[in-house]
Image (tube, coloured by chain):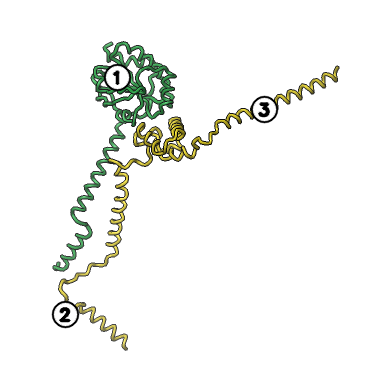
Amino acid sequence: MTEVEDKTVAEETQTSGGPKWGRMAVWGGLLILLTLLALGLRRTQQGPVGPGQKAPAFVLTTFDGQEIDSADLAGKVIVLNFWASWCKPCEQEAADLETAWQYYQARGDVLFLGVDYVDTEPEAMAYLNKFNISYPNGADLGTRISQAFRIRGVPETYIIDQDGVLSHTQIGPFTSLSQITAVIDPLLGQ
Amino acid sequence: MMRYSRLTMVNLLSIMRLVFLMAVFFALLVPGAALAQDTDPDAPTDDEVNAIAREMYCPVCENVPLDVCGTQACAQWRALIREKLNEGWSEAEIKAYFVDQYGARVLAEPPRQGLNWLVYVVPPIAFLAGAYILYRGLQSWRQIEPVAVADEPPQQGEDILPDDYVARLEEELRRSQQ
């Protein structure tokens, strides 16, 4: 190969591939983009948090303006119920949940919390009045709590033990009062 | 007696028919009046509600714009939009309210902040990169064999063209002159 031919080949390589830093930037950007995509896909494929896992931290602002921080609830059994006024299956368990709350309320070591998912406040209030629900309820502002628990719909109920670990996940409505007490009583040593 | 009875029957039927017609008339009139009362000229129209709703998505019904979504949740949201419009809220205020309540994912167009920028930046960059790659590809396909060019100009008397090419050229010229 002559000197002239060598030079031609060198020029060809430089112009077709672009500068070295440019190629590195393109590959780096592509790698970052694919990583973000993979993380997003992984998150969507994960499904709801399950028993044995640490319950995600949350702050619930109730309809009467009270802020309930999960960090302040250590030592209590938490029954976290996701519901909505437009959800017909939620109505099946509403009365049983309220009865269960009335049953455990006096003990002081069990707290029922209702998280109103993607709902409008007037409809939510009408729903609470219809079923005489007295335990704290609040809107899932910004859908942050439902995203933290990765719920797939309503109703879903998460029972969190005194150590903040999920002990039971109820996908769909509870069908009876005894079903609710059957998952809470063992946590209370009953 | 028989004739009296027949006349009475005819009269009775006429009265019944009249009563029935009046009942029908009032039945039609009363809802009409009720509808007329409901029609408020300042109330937001369906088009105004849908203009905002079509730029929003309910998280329950993914990929279905709010204006055409048939679920009860979406119907409640549209009712809420109507209520807010009725209270004099602007489109931006209503959207901000929904974002506060349900998160930014309710918007058809994600807000330009944080990682959302990727949605706006990546597609044009990918398009431009693709166009550049295509351009380079086409260019290389059209490129003729690279001709080596010497850095220094040829010296006087030095042949630029190959000998066989010159010989062929001279031959062709000779033929054309004959």
C-alpha distance separating marks 1 and 3? 60 Å
Image location (x, y in percent) of residue A4: 16, 68
- Residue neighbourhood size for the residue with mark 1, other residues' Cα within 10 Å, grouped as few (<14), some (14–19), many (≥20): many
Labels in figure, total:
3
Task: Report if the CB atoms under discs 1 and 3 are less than 8 Å apart.
Answer: no
Q: Is residue B138 above or below residue A75?
A: below
Q: Which residue is mark 3?
A: B24
Task: Report if the CB atoms under discs 2 and 1 are less than 8 Å apart.
Answer: no
C-alpha distance separating marks 3 and 2? 115 Å
Letter of the chain that mark 1 sits on in the rendering: A
Chain B drawn colour: yellow
Residue B173 appears in the figure: yes
Give the amino acid at mark 3: Val
The residue most toward the bottom is: B178
Image location (x, y in percent) of residue A61: 32, 25
Q: Which residue is mark 1?
A: A78
Q: Nearer the viewer's eye, disc 1 or disc 3? A: 3
Kindly indicate the quadrant of the structure image that contains residue A66: top left
The residue lying at 26 percent from left, 12 percent from top is A189
Q: Which residue is mark 2?
A: B158
Camera-side residue of B80 and A112: B80
Give the amino acid at mark 2: Glu
> Is the same chain shared between marks 3 and 2?
yes
